[in-house]
Structure formats: C-alpha cells, structure tokens
C-alpha cells in the first residue's frame, strides 16, 4: 500500500452510520449463507496467530 492510500480521507458519513439501527441496514445485495457454503468452508489461521494461540 502506498503512502497516498494511507493519507486519503474517508468520505464515509460516520455519524449517519453510527445512528443507524440494525433494522435500517439494507442486506438485499448480500446473498444468504447456506449450509453448502459452511460445508465447503475451510478455517485458515495465519501461522503467527496460530503460534500465539499455542502459547496462551
């Protein structure tokens, strides 16, 4: 990632977003997760994170 990307200002209206309730969120463009999806899903844990889990 370039420095230019890190310095860009978010155009998100955070106040409007934070004032929304869960019922106000439009999920119509997100397909539902099916049993088939979860049956095919594979859990992948980054090596560094897996090493930290063993030490805990």
Image (cartoon, rainbow, N blue to C red):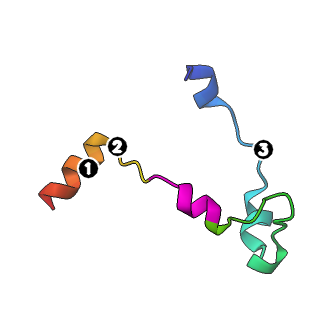
Q: Which residue is mark 1?
A: 50
Q: Residue at 70% of width from left, 37% of height from top? A: 9
Which class describes the residues within 10 Å of circle 3: few (<14), some (14-19), or many (20+)?
Answer: few
Q: Which residue is mark 3?
A: 11
Dot 2: what SS?
A: loop
Tell me where residue 6 sits by quadrant.
top right
* Residue 38 magenta: yes
Q: Residue at 86% of width from left, 64% of height from top? A: 28
Q: Quadrant of the N terminus?
A: top right
Dot 3: what SS?
A: loop
Residue 38, how many percent across, how many down?
56, 63
Residue 46 shows which numbered tag?
Answer: 2
Residue 25 shows which numbered tag?
Answer: none
Residue 23, how many percent across, how many down?
80, 79
Q: Nearer the viewer, residue 40 or 5?
A: 40
When the figure is inspected, residue 33 is found, relative to residue 19, above or below; the finding is above
Do labels 2 and 1 touch, CB within 8 Å? yes
53 horizontally vs 19: left or right? left
């Amino acid at each position: 990632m370039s420095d230019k990307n890190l310095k860009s200002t978010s155009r998100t209206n955070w106040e409007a977003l934070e004032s929304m309730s869960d019922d106000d969120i439009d999920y119509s463009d997100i397909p539902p997760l099916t049993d088939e999806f979860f049956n095919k899903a594979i859990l992948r844990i980054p090596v560094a994170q897996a090493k930290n889990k063993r030490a805990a």
